[in-house]
Amino acid sequence: MCRHLGWLGRPVSVASLVCAPPSGLLVQSYAPRRQRHGLFNADGWGVGFFDGAVPRRWRSPAPLWGDASFASVAPALTSGCVVAAVRSATIGMPIEASATAPFSDGRWLLSHNGVVDRRVLPAPSTAESACDSAVLAAVIFDRGLDRLADTIVDVGTADPQARLNVLAADGSRLLATAWGDTLSLLQRPDGVVVASEPYDDDPHWRDVPDRHLVDVSAAGITVTALEGR
């Protein structure tokens, strides 16, 4: 299980999203408040952001709290679209940078918070790692993000024990699914945060119902049910 966060809005520093909040991903790496599976997220971290239309990534298999170089550079990294995650590896999955979200197809950044039986997934054209999240990401990329809702329903039907909280962004659009774990939404004056759990006690955070899809773009925010599609 993992914790992840997405941002879409005016350019802000990565540090303001990941490090500065009192219960941000940095704190969630060792003391998450709402995590249902696992106690720590010490098996790696990753930050992806958009430089114009180009996705950039910084990933590590080490705990986020021990990375002094990231803490030093993060205030200087700014973007209007960010996807970040801290990882608690599924038992038996490799602990390596390539197994850490966000994954990318060169256009999208994608994080998976959950677990899935790789045997129910179709063989993707390519995957960054053999871990379940990387294979799921590759399947989603192959099918296309416009079909994200259908893909999540199909995989969840094939593996009823799967937890499929996915977060994806392409620089102008942010998509997220709640399927088996917590997801929250914060609309700020300068943009929108979608995260596994609130990073502070702002009363404007909203919980996303389970088995729902969040779609954030310049047109606004929509939250729609995934079941019954």
Image: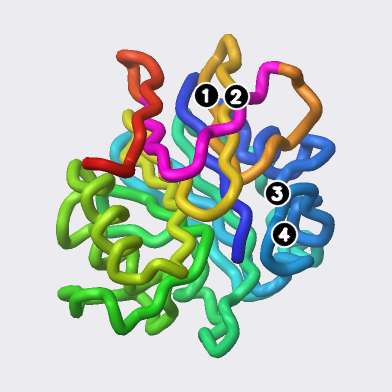
Q: Label 2, on which residue?
A: 186
Q: Residues within 10 Å of mark 1 (few under 14, many from 20)?
A: many
Figure quadrant of residue 138: bottom left
**Amino acid found under the numbered disc labelled 2:** Leu
Q: Which mark is residue 97?
A: none
Question: Which disc is residue 25 wearing?
Answer: 3
Asked whether the viewer can see residue 169, the reply is yes
To which residue does mark 1 refer? 192
Give the left or right position of residue 102, taking residue 127 as reference.
Answer: right
- Tag 1 and tag 2, C-beta contact below 8 Å: yes
| Circle on res. 69 | 4
Q: Which contiguous range is marked in magenta?
A: 204-216
Q: Which mark lies nearer to you, 2 or 4?
A: 2
In primary-sequence order, the first of circles 2 and 3 is 3
Who comes first in sequence, dot 3 or dot 1?
3
* Relative image position of residue 155 (x, y in whole percent): 29, 64
What is the three-letter code of the residue carrying label 4?
Answer: Ser
Between the residue at mark 1 and the residue at mark 4, the CA separation in whole angstroms equals 27 Å
Dot in front, 1 or 4: 1
